[in-house]
Image (tube, grey):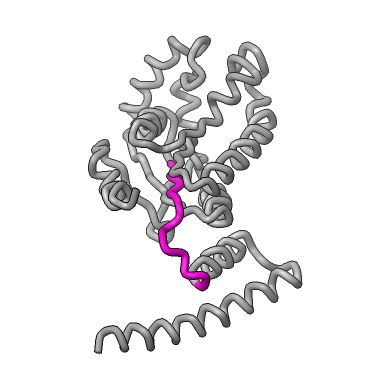
Amino acid sequence: MIAQRVEVLDDTLICRLEARLGDLLQAERTGSLTGEGRAEITRISAALTGRPRRGPLAVLMTGMPGAGKTTLARALEQAGYQRLCPDEEMFRRYGHYGRDFPRGEFRVREAPVLKDISIELRNHLMAGHDTVVDHGFWTPEERAEWSAIVAEAGGVPVLVYLPVPHEVRWERIKERNNLATVDANSIEFSEEDLKRFAGRFRPPTAEEAHIVYDGQLDGLLASLGQGARNDEV
């Protein structure tokens, strides 16, 4: 009885998915398809083809400087994730921020780096590798754009939010500033910079599915389904 009920539900769902897919493809033909719509095409296509396993995970972090993103990303790397870090690539290409290139040029120089990182991300996901992007993703628009990139590559985007009080972050930044000339992940900031950044940062709301990271790696790995994924290997 249960098997029959599931089969009926599956048939109904397939019809709905096919209808929705038709609408999305029509939007693509007319040039009105959004990035989220393109990601939805990928998800529906995967469902209709009966993909046996969930796609690889892509952890996208959101948090202010000093929130602990790199520490978490390195921990996930130790757990088997591929780690991609735009700041490290910026340092490799351009050197020290504020010394080897003007502070006002950061965003301009960062744009091609992020584009290349997105290509690396796609390649890792298409190869089936769980990946973490060691970056802040300050706005919903950025997060939606990168979630679409992940979905288009057959991956599953997971947003992880690192909320840390200003005082804690500033203490970390002060220590980090001493390494700014030699450490790619220690970009030098003043406290005024940090306060100014806070006005531009838009934390995820209930409308964006996300995991709040409380500093407990085991809990996060459990939320990511790490145990279940290890059992599949």
Measuring from the top left, give residue 106's x and y in whole percent: 63, 27
| Relative height, residue 139 to residue 28 (above, below) | above
- 215 to the left or right of 151: left
Image quarter hosting the N terminus = bottom left
Q: Residue furthest front?
A: 233
At x 55%, y 66%, the residue is 40
| Relative height, residue 206 to residue 125 (above, below) | below
Measuring from the top left, give residue 92's x and y in whole percent: 60, 19
- 117 to the left or right of 175: right
Measuring from the top left, give residue 126's x and y in whole percent: 55, 49
- 20 to the left or right of 72: right
Measuring from the top left, give residue 198's x and y in whole percent: 46, 36
The quadrant in which residue 179 appears is top left
At x 56%, y 47%, the residue is 142
At x 69%, y 72%, the residue is 27
The residue range painted magenta reads 48-61
Residue 57 belongs to magenta span: yes
